[in-house]
Structures are given as C-alpha cells and as structure tokens.
Amino acid sequence: MTAREVAEVLAEIAMLGELNGENPFRSRAFASAARALEGSDADLNTLAREGRLTSLPGVGAGLAETIRELVETGRSTAHEEMRAAIPIGLYDVLRIPGLGAKRVRLLHAGLGVDSLDSLETAVRAGRVAELSGFGAKTEAKILEGIAFVREALRRRRYPEAHAVAERLLAWLRARPEVLSAEVAGELRRRMEVVDSIDLVVCTLDTQAVTAAFRDLHGSGEADAEREGCSTIRLPDGILAHLYCVPPEEAPAVLLWQTGSEAHLSALAARAATHGLTLSPAGLLRNGQGVVPVETEDELYEALGLVWIPPELREGMGEVAAAADPLPELIRVEDLRGTFHCHTTYSDGRASVAEMAGAARARGWRYLGLADHSRSASYAGGLPEALVRQQQAEIDAWNAEQGGEEFRIFKGIESDILPDGSLDYPDAVLATFDYIVGSVHSGFGMSEAEMTARIVAAIRNPRLTMLGHPTGRILLTRGGYPVDIHAILDAAAEYGVVVEINANPHRLDLDWRHLRYAVERGVLIAINPDAHSVGGLDDVSFGIGAARKGGLVARQVLNTWTREEVEGYFAGRKA
C-alpha cells in the first residue's frame, strides 16, 4: 500500500475508534499519523522491512504494527474488526455536515439510528430533539443534511469520474470493433460534479460493443438498454452510459449527448431560423433529409456558428456569441505561476525548496507560498517567530537559486476573523509580498453577518486576494451563506483579487459567478491550495472552471509575467 492509502485506513480507524467511544488519545494518535502520511513520500516498505516505522513522526509501537500489517498484507485486522462492528449505514450518516463521530454515536446508542432512513424517521418523530445536546434547530439541519448526502451519494467529483472514464475509454479504444470513442455529457463540459459517465463510440458492430460493455468485470447489472445504448452501474455506484453509432451519426450524437439541455435548446432555435431541425440524428432539412457533416465543427458551421468549446455549452449566451469568432479561452499553458500553496511550515508536505523546485520544473517563473496564519492552530498556523524564519529562508533561496529566472513570493493565508479583521498585527502583515484572506471558522453566521465579515476584510488595504470565497467542499458541505454579488462588488471597488481555489474538492469561486466578476472588473487568480508537490497540478481543474466562466488569459493574475506580478504586488502594498 502507498503512504496515501495507509493514511486513509489510519484516518478511518481514528474515526471508528471515536464512533465506538474508545480511548480518545488512541484515536487522536491515529488521526495525527494519517495527516503526517497523507502526501508523504516515505518509503514505508523499506521502513517496515528494516523495523524503522517508529522513526516516523508520532508513530509508536502500536501504530507501527498496524502500518507494518497494512504495508505487508494490504489489510489491517484491527481495521476490519472495527468496521464489522459498525452498521454500514452509519457511514452515510457520518457524511452529514455538522454530525461528527461523537454525535453519531449518541444517535446510534440512544435511538438505534443505523442509516439515513432510520435517522430521518427519528427526526420526523421528534425523538432526536429529545437527546441531550440536540434540539429543534439541530433536527432541521439534520434533515437538510440527509437531503444533501442522498444527492451527493449518486454523484462524483470531476477528477474521480474522469479517472474512471479514462479507463473505460482505453478499454473501448483497444477493441477491434471500435473506430473511435469519446467522453460526452457533464464530464466533457467539465462540470465540477457529475451524475454519470457518458461515452460515445463510433462502430460498425454495435451489438458486439454493447454486449462487451454490459459484461464488464465488476460492473453492476444493466439498468437500461435500447438500440445502440447501454447503461451499467459501476461498483462505486456511478452510472455509465454507452452510445454506439455508425460514423455518419457520430458528430450529431456527440453534440447531443454532450448537452447541456439549455445549449441544445438554443441551437434548436438557431436551426429553426435556418429552416432546419436539430435532433439526435443530426440536422434535418424539411423534417427529413439529414444535412451531411463529418465533424462537430461542420455541424456548428451549418448553423452559421463557430465551434463552441464544450465547457461553454451551458445555455448562457454562448450560441448567440458564436455567430462571431469567440475569444480564446485560458489554457493550462498560459499559467506562469500560482500563489496559494502550503509547505511544512504549516500543514504542507513539502519544504520551501521542494515546492519551488517543483514549480520551476513545470516551467513556471514564480511561486507564492501562503502557509496558514497563527489562528489556524489546527493546521500548524505560523506564530510570528516562524513567519520570520520562513521569510528568511525564502529570501536566502531567492538570492542563491532564484535570480532572474524564478522567484518565490512571500505570502500568508491569513484567517479572516469573525469581526472581519486579518490575523496578525499590521506590522507583521506589512512584511509579506501579498496576503490571501480566507474564512476557516464561524460558518454558523447569518448571510448578512458573513457578508459583512468578508467585505470588512476586503476593505483592509493589506488584503491582496480572497481565498475560497464561499468555503464549500463539494459533495461534503455547501458553502456558508453569503451574498456573493456583494462580495464581488466590494472586490471590484477595492481592487482585491478573487481566487478560484483549484482543489477539485472546492473549485471555489464557482464558475457560475465568474462572468459577473469579470463584468465588474475583478481580477481572478487560479490557485491550487497545494499541500504537496503533486497538488500543484490541481491548477488544471481551476483552468476547467475558468474556461466554463469564459475567462481569457489576461483576466487571470497568474498568467502575468513575473515583472508584472511584482509590480502589481508592490502597487497594492503602496
């Protein structure tokens, strides 16, 4: 098992221990070890073989034995015994925002709750409010959480679904009957979460391909089937739809199955003005003869349009705009650096030098390091002494290895405190090249209170950019209540950059708000919130969100040259 896989098991053991009411110190030890190993490049196989697992931070003899068993056998006896003692439905209950393991234990022990259904029944009967520490408001939030979890269980984040789709595509393209295979649907449109995996295959032997698809090893039963179409449920619960078509129908079916409904509706209206009808079979003239096209580009051209990138196909005016050439959307290659990254000074897994080297290896010209501020003690937030130490290390690295080719910018992810002030005294804030302000606590504020809090931070002349503006974690929790237009208006007025947090669990700012932001003149930054070297690559997910919002390179700060960024930061500080 890799260090990351071991970390996942250790984290689950910690959670299960808390759920079972076991020794809290043991649970905390497993949780700490999991955090230390997540993203670690430690060679656990060698350490286990040499009996040196206790050399890992926070790993004692008991933990070392669990890790050794995982590394050598791929399983843990203790983990399996703990899992067997927990009703499987409680895993879903644990996903409800605001319900930690301790509260779930109370619900299970006091009311026999063992699933979402039994919890909902208890809530609606008023029995949850009778438990100590619960009440009517908690019941209402639990009902909201149950609906959220049920919705989330049938959906997947983009990278998870994309990884499955890539494996399916590779399998399809290797079959002799398949002429071509492409992803469609929400995945092709780069939606942040998707309901299904949609694949369009061009083939002359539909029956052979669909039969093989239904018989995939490990897949669930076929839930639906019609001529040329097969749907299976994969082991993790997500649906995969396969559409098999002959070559002449492939462009139209790819377009149709990519969607969205709003985009197709706008195209159909456009087709009508040309005396055409848009259907899954293609463009029909006078309701019958199909207009011959060989590519999607030709299909759009037949409607007097330029080809529209799939990311834009959301029915937000893109069809009308495509009557003229569209601006070139931002690409990963346009990035010259990024700004919101963490190191071992707080909760990152790589050193200053390692993060800088990885950024340089990607062809970037700069990297901004923004570790957590002192209020984020749970994430190793930096006291003032460590701020000075890190800044001295960055200055030394820049002097010795940076030169004209590369620069590390000194930043901080300063907590936005409940009153809207920034963490650290003003004299400390003045020592950074730039400051990312983020909310990490106090999510229970009303919309008016949270909006006022963030606007107050934006008005602070020390703030350079706003981090993950709504605090959402996709499929885990919704964002805190906030008037996002008021936030963007304030950012425009005070010249504060707004982040697209490119971590695929966040993708916050939501792409749906990007057009309003750009219309107001807000500058955007695409930041990976990287806690490891590999995390730098998450910028690609931020690029997908930016493209969905219609952004071009110049509207994103980290496409600017190093000299331009230096000037921008200096201007903000002045």
Image (cartoon, rainbow, N blue to C red):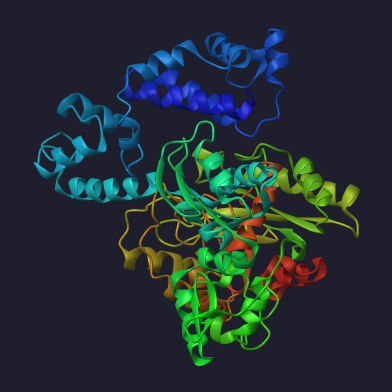
Compare residues 517 and 299 and report the one nearer the observer.
299
The answer to which of 18 and 318 lies nearer the viewer is 318
Find residue 555 and report its image quarter: bottom right
Judge whether 430 appears above or below 386 on screen: below
Q: Residue at x 56, y 43 (%)?
A: 381
Residue 316 seen: no
Q: Position of residue 299 (x, y in %)?
A: 62, 77
In the rendered image, residue 242, in percent from the top left (x then y), is placed at 52, 51
Horizontal side, residue 52 vs residue 112: left or right: right
- Quadrant where the N terminus sits is top right
Give left or right: position of 393 versus 20: right
Quadrant of the rendered structure where residue 17 is?
Answer: top left
Residue drawn at the location 91% of the way across and 60% of the way down: 404
Give 320 or 209, whichever is nearer the viewer. Answer: 209
Question: Can residue 61 be seen from the camera position used here?
Answer: yes
Q: Whole-percent x and y of residue 64?
A: 58, 12
Q: Residue at x 48, y 57 (%)?
A: 416
